């Protein structure tokens, strides 16, 4: 499951890779929406204060540590700059692409994404066995969902097709959870395939699609809903690989029960059935293989490129820029990993060469000692 999303004003969202043109271009995706972000934060903070005192600490955990709406971390210690979490910015970018100029509408769309992701987080924890406060988590999952539903009610009339979309998405969410709980019973030929990832990312699509479809309905362009859905499906498949790759050390290695595409893929590479444990040492060894990592990045890039084609057909310029920056970042990562691996091999070669030199010197010294001993006799 997704472990964390990041929401903040631009300077808190992403650590730029440097004072380069790429960094400034990346920042520009977020800066103009800073007032919208502050509005959402104020709204969520006010809603949080209405909760009973017994629930506020648990709620604050989700608001600051998981779906980081009100995070209190150091702005200089941001999320990985190559892995932006585009919540709630997707709502802003699509609103811009579809010509929705009303700031209040744009902000409510963003707020809906925030609340639906908040509702999923405690629900995911309970399914994953992380029920540190099960009663509070159960209540908060419903409470966040209610807030999401109330935002949609402000945006759409009762006869809007959004309610059909929401109903279908809610059913899909349940199907995705059922698959995640049961899929370990079956061996998977290719965990990086579209079939596996379509199932693994079903709940992500269910979270994001209704809001973005709502953008098309609000702009009287319902003919674009199918394109939006294809975009969301492709993007979430790529996002699922990315999220699983970033979080594989936090996922459970003992059995393939959480639908992690990365752990499932490593098991296939090692020939280990899902019923057997995957040791951390073996996982690290496999991920040190450039060919294995290359397959992961190639699959992720393929889904992001498919999503980009759909976004370009809308056209949604901000979204295509985001994907371009991600793809460029992933190429840089691969190059850095290859360089680090070459450096590691060189270090090992130097250590072995030094060890061989020491052995030769010791052997020569022993040989001289033996000759001296023989000469003394």
Image (cartoon, rainbow, N blue to C red):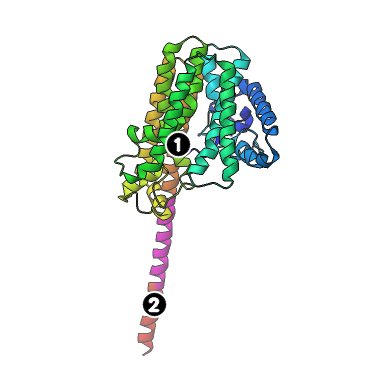
The secondary structure that dominates the magenta segment is: helix
Find disc 2 in the rendering and name its residue.
Answer: 366
Judge left or right: residue 82 versus residue 199: right
Whole-percent x, y for residue 72 in the image: 67, 38
Pointer 2 local density, CA inside 10 Å: few below 14, some 14–19, many at least 20: few
Judge left or right: residue 377 versus residue 211: left
Work out whether 376 lies above or below 112.
below
**Residue 204 inside the magenta-drawn segment:** no
Query: Bounds of the magenta span?
Result: 344-362
Whole-percent x, y for residue 273 in the image: 32, 50
Q: Residue at x 40, y 27 (%)?
A: 234
* Residue 27 appears in view: no
Whole-percent x, y for residue 375 in the image: 36, 86
Mark whose residue sits in front, 2 or 1: 1
Residue 242 - label: 1
**Residue 357 inside the magenta-drawn segment:** yes
Q: Residue furthest top?
A: 220
Q: Residue furthest bottom?
A: 377
* Residue 184 appears in view: yes
Name the one closer to the observer, 224 or 286.
224
| Quadrant of the rendering where the C terminus is positioned | bottom left
Whole-percent x, y for residue 297 in the image: 39, 36
């Amino acid at each position: 499951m997704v472990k964390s999303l990041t929401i903040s004003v631009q300077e808190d969202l992403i650590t730029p890779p440097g004072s380069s043109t790429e960094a400034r271009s990346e920042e520009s995706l977020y800066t103009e929406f800073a007032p919208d972000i502050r509005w959402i934060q104020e709204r969520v903070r006010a809603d949080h204060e209405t909760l009973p005192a017994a629930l506020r600490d648990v709620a604050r955990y989700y608001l600051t540590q998981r779906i980081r709406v009100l995070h209190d971390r150091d702005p200089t210690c941001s999320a990985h700059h190559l892995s932006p979490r585009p919540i709630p910015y997707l709502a802003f970018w699509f609103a811009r692409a579809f010509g929705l100029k009303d700031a209040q509408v744009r902000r409510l769309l963003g707020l809906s994404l925030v609340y639906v992701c908040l509702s999923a987080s405690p629900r995911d924890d309970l399914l994953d066995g992380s029920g540190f406060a099960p009663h509070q988590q159960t209540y908060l999952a419903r409470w966040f969902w209610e807030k999401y539903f109330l935002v949609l009610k402000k945006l759409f009339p009762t006869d809007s097709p959004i309610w059909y979309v929401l109903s279908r998405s809610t059913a899909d969410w349940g199907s995705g959870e059922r698959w995640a709980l049961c899929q370990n019973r079956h061996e998977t030929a290719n965990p990086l395939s579209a079939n596996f990832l379509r199932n693994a990312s079903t709940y992500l699509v269910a979270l994001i699609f209704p809001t973005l479809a709502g953008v098309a309905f609000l702009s009287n362009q319902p003919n674009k809903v199918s394109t939006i859905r294809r975009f969301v499906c492709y993007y979430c498949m790529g996002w699922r690989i990315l999220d699983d790759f970033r979080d594989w050390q936090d996922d459970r290695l003992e059995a393939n029960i959480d639908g992690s595409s990365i752990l499932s893929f490593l098991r296939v590479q090692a020939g280990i059935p899902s019923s057997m444990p995957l040791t951390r040492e073996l996982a690290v060894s496999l991920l040190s293989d450039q060919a294995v990592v290359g397959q992961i990045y190639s699959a992720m890039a393929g889904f992001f490129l498919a999503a980009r084609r759909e976004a370009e057909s809308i056209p949604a310029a901000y979204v295509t820029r985001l994907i371009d920056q991600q793809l460029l970042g992933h190429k840089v990562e691969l190059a850095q990993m290859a360089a680090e691996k070459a450096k590691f091999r060189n270090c090992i070669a130097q250590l072995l060469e030094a060890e061989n030199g020491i052995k030769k010197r010791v052997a020569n010294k022993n040989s001289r000692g033996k000759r001296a001993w023989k000469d003394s006799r």
